[in-house]
Image (cartoon, rainbow, N blue to C red):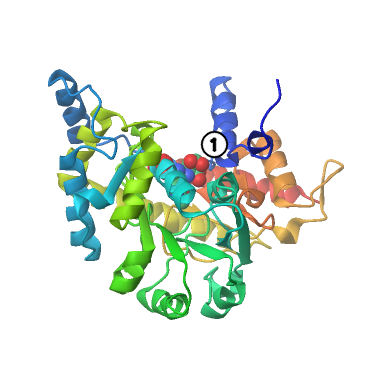
Amino acid sequence: MKLANRALNISPSQTLAIDSEAKALLARGVDVISFGAGEPDFDTPDYIKEAAVAAIWAGKTKYTPVAGILPLREAICRKLEFDQGLKYKPEQIVVSAGAKHSLYNAMQVLVQEGDEVILPAPYWVSYLEQIKLAGATPRIINTREENGFKLTPAELEKAINPRTRLLILNSPSNPTGVVYTGDDLKSLHDVILKYDFSILSDEIYECFIYNGLKHVSIASLSPELKGRTVVINGVSKAYSMTGWRIGYAAAETPVAKAMANLQSHSTSNPTSIAQEACVAALNGDKCVLKQMMVEYSRRRNVMLERLAGIPGITCIKPGGSFYAFPNVSAYFGRFYQGKQINCATDLAAVLLEEAHVAVVPGVAFGNDDYFRLSYVCSMEKINEGLDRISDLLGKLK
Ligand code: PMP
Ligand code: GLU
């Protein structure tokens, strides 16, 4: 059977592929330590599960409005206003099957053939494919480690041309952990306002912020920018709800309407039961989140300390998310048992085969001098995994 070019040109998600590989090895009894997928290891809090069970017994098991039930969209509006000072009406919110789905919908309604989308690299793997799926062309800006991987106003301005329709921003970032401060965003804002394109602001890691930094949404900088921004967020990471598949977008009414129309012909509403659980999550006590963040912060410190102790590795201190993104290029050109290591993909393969440690090579994020380690596992596993990485690197000749 012939496949459409759209299908032929798409690469599978490497983050999910590595996660599946690590899980399959574990199931076969191999003692794998996975720093692969960004999936929190905490269980979904009980009060959220209870709300889902109650929803089933209350018969909330039917189609809902495509964009999500009103109590959930109201809860999202309250959250955005409370946390970011962003005022939206429920009709400006579209709830989807995960933030990935929200991003997909946004990309489909905002860009098309002939358009360019500015994508700062390193970038999260799915942005690139979603841009291509929408028929648009990615315009990648390679941000630099010495700048903490922050996009500078000059780099942004250089990439803008008459075809530019969209800029993707992801703060805190996957995979680098970079957090844009209010001042960083303000300097980008001043460039953006000189031109006419939209912003897709993926804020899914907003809760994962360390060292007293604060999450700022670019949409909160001015009413004009808010009008040009689609804010993306969700509950997968913050509430350990990856499997429930709920994400959301907040945008001007015509954009939200277009996204809901698109969704009405694909998935219809996201799962009714998961939506009810999310109302409980968003309206619930934030104490549970705070406890999880304390633990992530401890893990981050240990991971960064351990990485700093490995000769040849450099790693920026990420201000947010739950990833470290070390530069491992000092090891390129060396050999492991006759096999030459020329990029992070080669190194990740040897690490998995020989040391049974799963990491995601930077090629998935647009720069294969690095690999990504997620610290969503126990402290014991972090230490054991870093011991194994350090031993293996020490054996390269
Ligand atoms: N954006 C980023 C940057 C992510 O890392 C992820 C991880 N899955 C998503 C969006 C999608 O999250 P969800 O599980 O809600 O689809
Ligand atoms: N976002 C997570 C990651 O980057 C989960 C996997 C995915 O959705 O691609 O690992």
Q: Amino acid at mark 1?
A: Leu
Q: Residue at x 47, y 58 (%)?
A: 173
Q: Quadrant of ligand 1?
A: top left
Q: Residue furthest left?
A: 58
Which x, y percent locates residue 147? 56, 74
Q: Quarter-wise, where is residue 186 in the image? A: bottom left
Quadrant where the N terminus sits is top right
- Label 1 neighbour load within 10 Å: few <14, some 14-19, many 20+: some
Residue in the foreground of this view, choosing between 380 and 52: 52
> Is residue 378 in view from this perspective?
no
What SS does tag 1 mark?
Answer: helix
Residue in the foreground of this view, choosing between 355 and 317: 317
**Residue identified by numbered label 1:** 16
Q: Residue furthest right?
A: 338
Whether ligand 2 has any atom under 8 Å from the Cβ at mark 1 is answered as yes
User: Left or right of 129: which side holds 395?
Assistant: right
Which x, y percent locates residue 18? 59, 36
> Is residue 45 in view from this perspective?
yes
Residue in the foreground of this view, choosing between 361 and 10: 10
Q: Quarter-wise, where is residue 29 in the image? A: top right
